[in-house]
Image: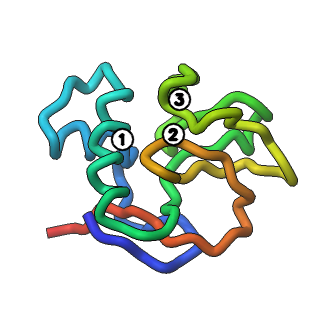
Amino acid sequence: FHLRNITRLCPTLLLTVAEKLINTFVFSRTDYGNALLAGMYLSSKISSNHRLGLSDSGSEGSWKWVDGTPVDMSDKYWNAGEPNNVVNEDCGELKKSKLNDTPCSINNPWICEKTA
């Protein structure tokens, strides 16, 4: 994986970031929560919030990964009080080791798959 300072979707992202993190850290593909544990490791190594491939722009409150898979809405995966949709927050990011909703216009770096 590599970090990119762009506001558009990474061109090499073929699977969701969660799926790739699960594979990288040898977690079960059926437990997206484990991907967040991997995200905790990543976020401890980086200083800013990073955009992930999730959004509810298709239908407010219906969060999905870029491949259309629904996001686990358990409170344990989201920061306290999130997602709260303040000021049209339709994109997801990794913030303090958990998920947060943020406006898609915010210029945060992405966590992307890097082709070999």
- Dot 3 or dot 1: first in sequence order is 1
Q: Determine whether the residue tagged by mark 1 lies in a helix, strand or loop.
A: helix
User: What residue appears at the point 69 percent right and 69 percent down from the top-left corner?
Assistant: 106
Would you place residue 5 above or below residue 103 in this image?
Answer: below
User: What residue appears at the point 44 percent right and 67 percent down from the top-left corner?
Assistant: 10
Q: CA distance from mark 3 to mark 1?
A: 10 Å
Would you place residue 24 above or below residue 82 in this image?
Answer: below
x, y percent for residue 16: 39, 45
Q: Is residue 32 left or right of residue 27?
A: right
User: What residue appears at the point 38 percent right and 58 percent down from the top-left corner?
Assistant: 13
Pointer 1 with pointer 2, Cβ within 8 A: yes
Q: Which residue is mark 1?
A: 18
Quadrant for residue 1, please give it: bottom left
Pointer 3 with pointer 2, Cβ within 8 A: yes
Q: Amino acid at mark 3?
A: Val
Q: CA distance from mark 1 to mark 2?
A: 8 Å
| Foreground disc of the pair 3, 2 | 3
Q: Amino acid at mark 1?
A: Ala
Q: Determine whether the residue tagged by mark 3 lies in a helix, strand or loop.
A: loop
Q: Which residue is mark 2?
A: 65
Residue lying furthest bottom: 5
Q: Amino acid at mark 2?
A: Trp
Q: Which residue is mark 3?
A: 71
